[in-house]
Image: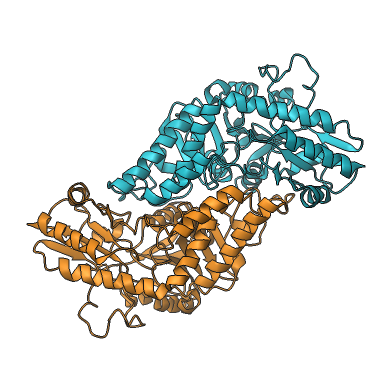
Chain colours: A cyan, B orange
Amino acid sequence: MIYLDNAATTLQKPESVIDAVVNAMRTQGNASRGAHNATLSASRTVYDARVKIAKFFNFDEPSNVIFTCNSTEALNIAINGTIKEGYRVISTDTEHNSVLRPLYHLEKTKNIDLNFVKADENGILGISDFEKLIDDRTKVVVVNHISNLTGNVNDIKKISEITHRKGAILIVDGSQSAGTRKVDVKELGIDIYCFTGHKGLLGPQGTGGLLVKDGIEIDAWKRGGSGVKTYEEDQPLDYPTRLEAGTLNSHGIAGLSVAIDYLNEIGIENVEKRELELTRYFYEEIIKIPGVKVYGDFSWIGDSNKSVNAVSDSFLGHAGIVSLNVKDYDSGEVSDALSNDYCIATRPGAHCAPRLHIALGTKYQGAVRFSFSYFTTYEELGVAIGALKDIAS
Amino acid sequence: MIYLDNAATTLQKPESVIDAVVNAMRTQGNASRGAHNATLSASRTVYDARVKIAKFFNFDEPSNVIFTCNSTEALNIAINGTIKEGYRVISTDTEHNSVLRPLYHLEKTKNIDLNFVKADENGILGISDFEKLIDDRTKVVVVNHISNLTGNVNDIKKISEITHRKGAILIVDGSQSAGTRKVDVKELGIDIYCFTGHKGLLGPQGTGGLLVKDGIEIDAWKRGGSGVKTYEEDQPLDYPTRLEAGTLNSHGIAGLSVAIDYLNEIGIENVEKRELELTRYFYEEIIKIPGVKVYGDFSWIGDSNKSVNAVSDSFLGHAGIVSLNVKDYDSGEVSDALSNDYCIATRPGAHCAPRLHIALGTKYQGAVRFSFSYFTTYEELGVAIGALKDIAS
């Protein structure tokens, strides 16, 4: 199988990650519960992972690295834990339902004043629209770093500047950026960064988390055992305990921790560069095929100021994601043909991004998403390009 | 290491469980997202696990088997999703903080009328107290199947009869019962059964769930991607999607599924019988040691009507848990000595069971908990008994 569905989950995990999970399942007790060797082993693994993850994202507080089971949980915690009755909240058309549905729910139950920055027909968000919508009444801005549908990268640094100038906080959905590009939460000015472990970070499913900047208060989400302060009726206030009730997935976290080591060995800049190169190659070939329509911002291709070696303030790069349609064919049928006839795994349909499909004009057709990883090869893309030529002709 | 902390997490997992996780990490995509082989493999694994778990607990609706990352999340979902403003709710002194803290929070935020069935000095709950407290105004009863501190088994069948007679629903915390004894949710009359995967069920950490009886409505908890009905602003209403936003831990679920097979091969009655025999042996030996005080209901030992072969309505059995203190020694110091000098893993302190420690009179001393699994041997218990003799003398 040629696996081009890495934006859903990366299929190829480093062997060292698998080994770490196996080792954890053989040796680790329950983290932070008691003090014998097995539980200490789990506690150390979890603590080491917090330290590594903090460093990986240039984040200062390992204790404010909170583990969750996926980025959806992290986003629910961040959104529900910071947004109060009547708040003015700004989000965008490029968001995933893991952001949209919690916000829609708060619109109904907490009467929040919810506004969206509109995406254009290429899925691009205008910075001037953030300037217009984020005003002095705004309390929280929620935006994804990278669209899971177009692969466009949002300009978090600029959005953060606007957000902070108006006294609001910025929650970033990093589901598609963690592990696929360099993310420096300090430089980008992110208050809460939510990530998942099983996509770009190459870790096991069942892992993820959020980084909570010092001073940002998030209400407890789950309540329960904390291994400390048992006689307090409230969930203890200290991070990470405030947001981590119950037994952690220390087996999965052991794998995630080693996955960070693996990415550090490759160098995250090399991952970013490779995915950008793969994307450019794929785009340049498929755009030649009559009947193929690609969605997203690829204006950087052919622009000599925006090479894969020059990701900068003026060029934010692009994720290893290319979504397209072939003529007016249903995206599900094209994806099925790719799977059945060419053994190529892609994802069709709506990708949990309803507002963006409406902006792109693909509500009914959906789109076929090709998404790459560091391990994707040009040979695999060659097969995919050939398959698209067949299907389009 | 002699591992006697199985009530925190089972350390020894079947090799087949580890193999299943490894295989899943090599082959499974994102469950319910798309239709290529890798995602279908994950979807099948998850669906098979629902079917097996349903059958294991004699539960009719695989679609109402909801996966969570642990039992704390399952309990938070069940408690917060069923209890509304002003409800009268009955719980007990034997509960874990994963039940108590969500309930205390609802007492503060939703003005619920919260009442506890009191435990006596042996941690026993009187059925007549349930009769008194559960009245016509009562909407929800939350009770654990087995105390994680004493190992006492609560009479769920009788509690369910009382609960249903008054028109309320019964939520059972099965954290200590799932995988350690036969649990027939239909026979016991349980409306919502919450379980974890990494304790008695011998599965990986990061797994757990709840069984929701047909007709019981639980509000959505996390909201987000569902892979279906993308354009609906609300989380879709169908189970399991209503309660399962985001990517499932299909790697862990693959392991849990095989763990159920393993338990089925042994026969759950044999697990129950073995843990009861180990418990009786250990209790009978340690009770002879001067200075050792044991907590919980062991009146069945020596009662010829209550043998390990006669778990019945009149004898509910006992979990493989024995908590004790040695003289007035701090439980942490005893547990440390067991770990450091004898390589025996136990758990001291409060075990997230504050009300029960108060009932037992051990709020300040805590207790040293020994907890067994099917794999625990009499030789290991012999070493533990010898160590306790040393420490007490």
Q: Residue furthest top?
A: A305
Is B249 positioned to the left or the right of B335 in the image?
Answer: right
| Residue located at (65% from left, 46% from top) | A101
Q: Provide residue B377's location: percent of width, then percent of height.
A: 28, 64
| Residue B392 in view of the camera | yes
Q: Residue furthest bottom?
A: B305
| Residue located at (41% from left, 62% from top) | B175
Q: Provide residue A40's location: percent of width, then percent of height.
A: 32, 43
Q: Provide residue A141's location: percent of width, then percent of height.
A: 62, 32
Quarter of the picture containing the C terminus of chain B is bottom left
Vertical position of residue B357 compared to residue A86: above or below: below
Report the number of numbered marks.
Answer: 0
Vertical position of residue A352 compared to residue B128: above or below: above
Residue B355 sits in which quadrant? bottom left
| Residue A245 in view of the camera | no
Name the residue nearer the viewer: B360 or B167.
B360
Vertical position of residue A244 compared to residue A94: above or below: below
Name the residue nearer the viewer: B181 or A161.
B181
Q: Residue furthest front?
A: A379
Name the residue nearer the viewer: A240 or B106.
A240
Q: Provide residue B338's location: percent of width, then percent of height.
A: 19, 52
Is B277 positioned to the left or the right of A42 in the image?
Answer: left
